[in-house]
Amino acid sequence: MLAGILSTACSSTPAAAPETKSGLRRENFRVEIDGRKVDLFVLKNNAGNEVCITNYGARVVSWTARDRDGNFDDIVLGFDDPQGYRKSGEPYFGV
């Protein structure tokens, strides 16, 4: 399903705007952990779907898609920044 959503004219460049549909802020992910730079990447398609992925463990942090009523909602459990994953004992949310 993810491949179908992403195959429709998606962009793999990092988010230009600080906010995403799910409310994530890219600057919250721009940190250094264990000497490695972390960032947030946003993939979008023409249907309005959006997937946010961080290079910290290749986690899918959010996935905003339409429900059966046409409303967008985030359908992935995730944290607003990499520190959330570290503080929670490294759950495998989105991995």
Image (cartoon, rainbow, N blue to C red):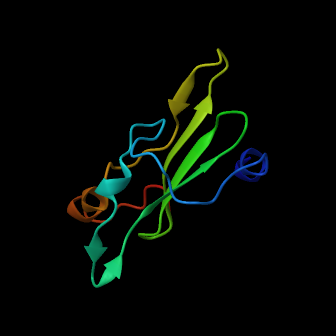
**Toward which corner of the image does residue 37 lie, by quadrant?**
bottom left
Question: Residue at point 41% right, 65% down?
Answer: 39
Residue 58, above or below 14: below
Left or right: 84 as drawn, with respect to 6: left
**Residue that appears at 50% across and 52% down:** 15
Q: Position of residue 59 (x, y in %)?
A: 48, 61
Q: Quadrant of residue 8?
A: top right
Q: Is residue 84 left or right of residue 65?
A: left
Relative to 11, does residue 62 appear above or below in the rendering? above
Q: Name the one closer to the observer, 53 or 94.
A: 53
Residue closest to the far front: 16
Residue 71: x %, y % from top left = 58, 20
State the residue lying farthest toward the left. Answer: 87
Picture mark count: 0
- Residue drawn at point x = 39 percent, y = 49 percent: 78
Q: Based on the displayed image, in which of its 4 quarters is residue 28 positioned? A: bottom left
Left or right: residue 78 compared with residue 45: left
Image location of residue 89, percent across then percent down: 25, 64
Q: Residue furthest bottom?
A: 35
Residue drawn at x 37%, y 70% is: 38
x and y percentages locating residue 19 in the rendered image? 41, 41
